[in-house]
Amino acid sequence: MICPHCGNETPEGHYCGYCGARLTASANRNPARRGSAYAANPHQSVYQPDVISTFFPHLNPARTRLFGWILAGLAVVIFALGFARFVPISTVLAALLVPLLYLAYFYVVQVYEDEPAWVLGATFLIGAILGLVATLLLYRSVISGQSIFVRPKPSHVLLVGVGVPLLAQALMLVGPLILFFARRQRFNDMLDGLTFGVASGLGYAAAESIVYSWLLITGLAPALGDPSSLALRTIPLALLKPLLYAGTTGLICAALWLRFDRTPPTREMSALTSLPVALIAAILGMIIPALGVTLYGGQWLNILWYAIPLLGIILLLRQVLHVGLIDKARSVGHGGTITCPHCHQTVADLPFCSNCGIAMRSISKRARVPVTAGAPAETATDRTSADTIPNTTQPDTTDTTPPPDQPTEGHDAENA
């Protein structure tokens, strides 16, 4: 059939295999943009603030649900430990929860199966080292002005609410920018930028959280308060701050990689995907919670100060990823047919699955296994076995050539 949006002849299905437009939803006001079907997970809307499908876009639906339950379950455990005043355990787990989950995700999907582990590890480590150094140098200035009885001085507000967040954001970009300028030819996809930005942000957040956790344990930080207060303190530490750091850095890097993607867009891209918008959103996402906590802090208010900017960053990041996958669609497959890891249907190996609409670029290389037409799975094994077994059969030396005085059937036919 001919796609009415891009004009290509696409296989029959719910989506165009070339541009990803929805073909069977006439009620959709903009089938080409398909806002109701997120390009990395068509079961979700672009405007659904799902943490897992945003920060872990290479997971299939089953693993998306699994990682979501793991994240929620561990957060509950950390909250319970904090409420029970198991300070060392809860603070360490809170600092490492999201970074370790992300490393597990990277290992499970093997995003770069042909690259050594240092590709992501170096980015994470650079962010962690810079976060550790910056936090150790600034923690005395940050803590010195904290008091629940005295309003902070303007100089302290500028330092903690503006200076420290801007410095943190700049340092979190160091590792991804090194890869961008040094190995952009190898890692040239928008999702590469997202991966490196999230890794660097989580490394920085882990180091910062460990330092402040140690201050809580040793008593150098302000008073811990009652058990419920301590439990609420672990929520921003465990989930919100690492995700916010990962979101702002991943947003900037995704927009940067998208800006220099040489693939021509299929249509005019939204201004929301531009690098200036990403920079402004990331800066506001870092400054707003820092200023809010400094000026109008409180256990419940601190959660809101981090949760609201994080919600906005996730929604904007999903928009960037969705538009990048749709408007800069390109083939990444092997040709022929492929079994879609998302819907498990055998479809043509095109930029999008014609059945479920997922962008094939959002699927890890390990999961993109081509289907050889007419060759069942056993054929490869049989062929390998045949190649490895030596041929011990003696050749047949019987001479079947007819005698010279007896012409062959072909000659008889020609003479006839």
Image (cartoon, rainbow, N blue to C red):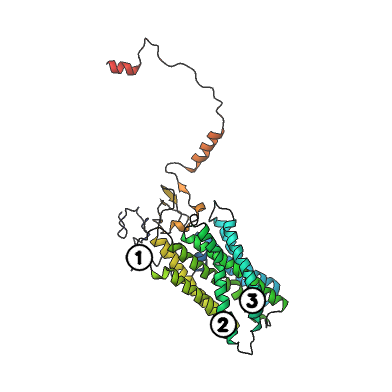
Tell us which disc is closer to us: 3 or 1. Answer: 3
Q: Nearer the viewer, mark 1 or mark 2?
A: 2
Task: Specify the farthest residue to the right.
Answer: 218
Tally of numbered discs? 3
Q: Is residue 297 above or below residue 96?
A: below
Give the residue at the far top of this rendering. Answer: 405
**Residue placed most toward the observer, 5 or 386:** 5
Q: Is residue 399 above or below residue 70?
A: above
Amino acid type indicated by mark 2: Leu
Residue designated by label 1: 268
User: Residue tagged by mark 2?
Assistant: 158
- Local packing at callout 2 (Cα closer than 10 Å; few below 14, some 14-19, many 20+) is some
Q: Which residue is mark 3?
A: 138
Secondary structure beneath dot 1 equals loop
Give the alpha-carbon distance from disc 3 to disc 1, as whole Å.
44 Å
Q: Quadrant of residue 242?
A: bottom right
- The x and y percentages for residue 305 are 54, 80
Quadrant the N terminus occupies: bottom left
Q: Earlier in the sequence, mark 1 or mark 2?
A: 2
Q: Residues within 10 Å of mark 1 (few under 14, many from 20)?
A: few
Decide: is 339 above or below 135. Answer: above
Q: Camera-side residue: 380 or 207?
A: 207
- What amino acid type should be assigned to the residue bearing mark 3? Leu
Residue 150 rendering spot, x and y as whole percentages: 63, 90
User: What is the three-letter code of the residue carrying label 1?
Assistant: Glu
| Label 2: which secondary element | helix
Do labels 1 and 2 touch, CB within 8 Å? Answer: no
Structural distance between the alpha carbons of marks 1 and 2: 39 Å
